[in-house]
Amino acid sequence: MNGVRPTKIERLGESELKVTWSDGQVRIYSCAELRDRCPCATCREKRSAGPPAPTDLPVLSAAEARPLRIEGMKPVGNYAYSIAFSDGHNTGIYTLELLRELGRAE
Ligand SMILES: [Zn+2]
């Protein structure tokens, strides 16, 4: 995994992302998967709290109720990318290792 990094990042329709890696691998990511796996402290805490009770009705903000999209992705140092989602969340730092685990190989 040493030195393997994205060489090309493209939008695939509204809800998917296609990343070409320097070793030739192409991976497809859904926005929902990336958002679900957001590594920031707030999201990690939410996940470890477990799923809400089935009777809890989640209250979604207007932005959350719209289909999720990726607004932008920018490199953080040379080891990670930060991803900004259309629901306004942009604090997740996705390391290259994590990005290689997520998504599916094309
Ligand atoms: Zn997060």
Image (tube, rainbow, N blue to C red):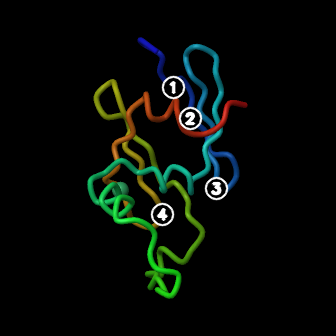
Label 1: state its secondary structure.
Answer: strand
Q: How far apart are marks 1 and 4 (CA)?
A: 22 Å
Question: Where is residue 64 shown, x and y percent of the image?
Answer: 48, 74
Q: Mark 1 points at which residue?
A: 6
Tell me the residue at 44%/34% (across/down). 98
Q: Residues within 10 Å of mark 2 (few under 14, many from 20)?
A: some
Q: Name the residue under label 3.
A: 15
Specify the amino acid type for callout 2.
Answer: Ile
Queried on whether the Cβ of the residue with tag 4 lies below 8 angstroms from ligand 1, the answer reads no
Is 51 positioned to the left or the right of 33 in the image?
left
Q: Observer-nearest residue: 73 or 56?
A: 56
Q: Do the residues labelled 3 and 2 touch (CB within 8 Å)?
A: no
**Tag shown at residue 9:** 2
Q: Observer-nearest residue: 43 or 92?
A: 43
Q: Do the residues labelled 1 and 4 touch (CB within 8 Å)?
A: no
> Between tags 3 and 2, which lies in front?
3
> Is 4 drawn above or below residue 67 in the view shown?
above
Q: Are marks 4 and 3 in contact (CB under 8 Å)?
A: no
Specify the amino acid type for callout 4.
Answer: Ser
**Tag shown at residue 86:** 4
> Is 14 drawn above or below residue 106 in the view shown?
below
Tell me the residue at 28%/28% (across/down). 77
Q: Quarter of the image holding residue 96?
A: top left
Question: Where is residue 31 shown, x and y percent of the image?
Answer: 57, 53
Q: Distance between the residues labelled 4 and 3?
A: 11 Å
Q: Do the residues labelled 1 and 2 touch (CB within 8 Å)?
A: yes
Query: N-terminal of the two: label 3 or label 2?
Result: 2
> Is 15 drawn above or below residue 55 in the view shown?
above
Q: How far apart are marks 3 and 1 (CA)?
A: 19 Å
Specify the quarter for ligand 1.
bottom left
Is 1 positioned to the left or the right of 27 in the image?
left
